Amino acid sequence: MTKERKVYTIDDLIDKTGKYITNPKDLEEIKKVYEYAKQKHSGQYRKSGEEFIAHPLNVAMILTSIYSDKASIEAALLHDVVEDCDSSTSEIEEMFGKEVGKLVSGVTQLSRINFSTENEYLIEYYKKIIVGMSEDVRVIIIKLADCLHNMRTLWALPEVKQKEKAKQTLEIFAPIAHHLGIHKIKSELEDLSLRYLKPNVFYDIAEKLNTTKLERDNTVYEMQQEVTNLLSEHHINHEIKGRAKSIYSIYNKLEKGRKFSDIYDLLALRILVNTEQECYLALGIIHSKFRPIPKRFKDYIAMPKPNGYQSLHTTVFGLDGYLFEIQIRTYDMNEVAENGIASHWAYKEHKDASQVFKNTTEQKLQFFKAIMELSEDKMSSEDFVNSVRDEVLNNNIYVFTPKGDVIELPKGATPIDFAYRVHTQVGESMVGAIVNNSIVPLSYELQNNDIVKINTSKNSSGPSKEWLKIAKCTQTKNKIKSFFSKNEKELYIERGKNSLEKELRKKKQSIVNFFSEENIKKICHELKLDGLDDIYLNVGNGKCAASTIIHIIEPKEEAPVVKNAPVRRNDADIIVDGIDKVKVNLANCCNPIPGDDIIGYITKGNGISVHRSICHNLSLLENRTVTVHWNEKTNQKYLSVVVIYTNTLENKLVDIIQKISMVDVSVQKINTINRIDQLVYEVDLYVSCVDKLNKLLQELSKLSCVEKVERVIQ
């Protein structure tokens, strides 16, 4: 299997490039780039013994086979000068332009990584590959060509290194080449990887192929002649050739338990015609003479793969009962299948290459879109790697929108994943799903070729937390989590705003004047916050009391206090140790009631504020506390706020009020809060002591519709 290595020159490169880049100035510039790279690599040699310049030259030659643009060819020639020589990216940009400089910079970033399949390095690899791709897809294509030439010369490395590099290539680079639709690079990478990972298996398959080659060649030739005569009779211009099955694809089939003699698509033909219509005509003509195998027909023309691949596949009983796998496609389709969409379009239409790559990324290569979206989500490195492996590089299914657009998803994906892949708003407004004209549950596992319609509603309250258990894609789960984080934040902000405005009204202060720009800056500076929403948020989530915010702006003089022996005030609910004749207020943030452990805080000019000892706002206050306790003779009722979380969207207010009426409490107000998958009730009530409040909480918890009941500390 060892081939004689071709020694390329710059003339070979110009020859190949000149077949599709016809501007003489462009070709001259490629020569200048080569001379610069050669001079920079002067005196450097590879482990294979050849001059180092041979490597970038070979990488550029590989790129010409997929019609890469001028900037890619130049970047390929320069891709090691920053890493291995004394050149800098800025120097490259100055001499050969920003476009080439950016490509070289992207490839250099990838080259600096110690590629490995060990987890920590794999994490870094994927993160860096995203950086390269987000800048320009061509960085990845150059890296693939670089990888391919390295694999061709892998024999020069020690065996341990050979296996390490081969494993990286098989697990990382070959799948990327597949998703890009560059079949010729993908196929060679796989075969070369297998050669070094499992040489015995590789050479055993190669030997069997050689042993049966003569027989196969004769059979294929006879079948070729039959099909050629058949198509010519019907005046279909065509080209037909035998198609070699890659060693790695045969290995995969053997791994699944197939016998070598049973791999019938070893006998394969590829038919190239001029038009799409002729593809179907040729198929019908072949089927009219050679009986097709049921369920082996694939129409990738009507339903292309996401990477742009189009072809008709069929398997028929050929001459002497041999099974033949036949592919029928146009010449243009064949270019895409072999070389990838982007390179082919750039070649055929002579468009600006960077724009072509941008367009193809957006329109066809969902692989890139998926990875780029993953990189934007906040997830751990472990999650990121697993997501790329599971959701992007392996086991994908292809489903359709009702309009026929193809959506690529990981195996096991549900309609929820489909909806969020179409658009986040579609996911958030989804109320149901129809697959193949049948209503399905949201937990339904999508299958290849399913046609999925998502029912949405403007009145939808958003996703349910249950969806987190159903969704397959990490990206989907992160978007659902993000929705809830945002909603809860908005709820806290609204609650904080209401608390502050209520406190200001109580103190008969102007809300507009209080929230002047100057006051907001002062509060933010004092509490190290970023803006008004942050102030509301800190009050709403209980980190700061509304009164504390107000006192930052309008502190009052401290009321005089007289220190005595402990005094019991018969007309007061609170006994203050060591202080008499002082104003006492119950704090609104925690609403203490008799039976609670309490503590007093000496305010500036507003007497003593009494808090529950567990109130988290005490940690924000200065250390000016006094000992206080409840007057045993008090028989009043005190305000307490209770939040009741239900497990349903049905209104259960009647049941809740019924339970409350069983306990000696007075309800002042009930506020209903609509959430995605539940109703929440915020109840302001008056109760005489903590024992009665606890009894009420216990009774409410017994209701089947109640998920949780808690007493609020704001």
Image (cartoon, grey):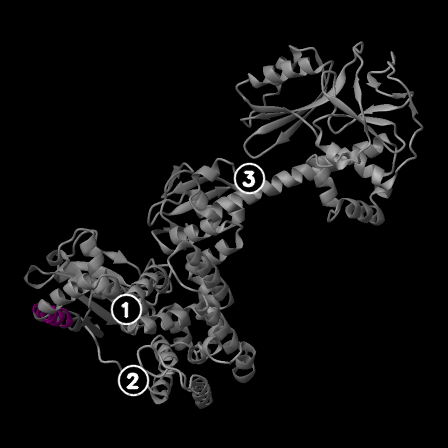
Q: Is residue 82 left or right of residue 486?
A: left
User: Which residue in the structure is indicated by mark 1?
Assistant: 188
Query: Can you give x and y, in whole percent of width and height, for residue 666 in the image?
Result: 72, 15
**Label 1, label 3: how far apart the Cα atoms are:** 48 Å
From the viewer's perspective, is the residue at label 3 or at label 2 nearer?
2
Callout 3: 10 Å neighbours few (<14), some, many (20+)?
A: many
Q: Report the amino acid beneath label 2.
A: Val
- In front: 355, or 207? 207
**Label 1, label 2: how far apart the Cα atoms are:** 19 Å
Decide whether residue 577 is among the magenta residues: no
> Which residue occupies 50% across, 81% down?
86
Callout 1: 10 Å neighbours few (<14), some, many (20+)?
A: some
571 over 203 or under it: above or below: above
Which comes sooner in the sequence, label 1 or label 3? 1
Query: Can you give x and y, in whole percent of width and height, for residue 476 in the image?
Result: 48, 46
Query: Can you give x and y, in whole percent of width and height, for residue 252 in the image?
Result: 22, 57
Based on the displayed image, in which of its 4 quarters is residue 97 positioned?
bottom right
User: Which residue in the structure is indicated by mark 3?
Assistant: 462
> Which residue occupies 84% across, 20% down?
576
Task: Report helix, strand or loop for mark 1.
Answer: helix
Query: Can you give x and y, in whole percent of width and height, for residue 582 in the image?
Result: 90, 23
